[in-house]
Image: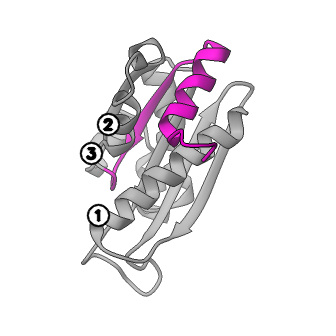
Amino acid sequence: MTGDKSLEVQVGELLLSKNWTVGTAESCTGGLIAHRLTNIAGSSAYVLGGIVAYSNTVKQSVLGVHQGSLIAHGAVSETVAAEMALGARRVLAVDVALSVTGIAGPGGGTVEKPVGLTYIGLAGPDNLLVVRRHLWNGSREAIKTASADAALALLLELIT
């Protein structure tokens, strides 16, 4: 964090300076990223919307995630995070879109995909597409918070 400015304030200032808009496609964070972005006064100038795509049906029907991707890789995967970000960018008609899919726990994890596994995607101008893998420890709320922090930090890093 720069000084005492929160990630969402820093992101908002940067988006405003670039005249860019942002949208989200969230699964395990349940809208937390959009919530944090819209906690900032004046955020309607750059936040166009968010989609909570908790079910695979919504991932497919709203965001255009391919059924084959879900079958081959699972909802918690780099491929699905990428498709969610691209879908959100298209559906919301934004300059940059963030996506997150993961296992917040306390149940639902496996040896291959443990609780705390999260993929964060970002789709932006000039075919920019980045997905980062994270493995968090802690409670469900801690995993959601860490994922939202990482998504905002990724956005800040890539648009700076």
Q: Is residue 70 visible?
A: no
Q: Report the residue that reaches farthest toward the front.
A: 3
Residue 57 disc label? 3
Q: Is residue 114 visible?
A: yes
Residue 109 in percent (x, y) is at 34, 79
Name which quarter of the figure residue 127 lies in. top right
Residue 87 disc label? none
Region of the chain picked out in magenta, as a range:
1-29
Q: Residue at x 41, y 72 (%)?
A: 116
Q: Residue at x 55, y 54 (%)?
A: 79
Residue 115 lies, with reference to residue 37, above or below; the image says below
Estimate how packed mark 3 is, as few (under 14), some (14 to 19) or many (20 or more) residues with alpha carbons within 10 Å.
few
Residue 5 lies, with reference to residue 136, above or below; the image says above
Q: CA gap, disc 2 to disc 1? A: 14 Å
Label 2 sits on residue = 35
Of labels 1 and 3, earlier in sequence is 3
Q: Is residue 11 magenta?
A: yes
Q: Amino acid at mark 3?
A: Thr
Label 1 sits on residue = 141
Mark 1 element type: helix
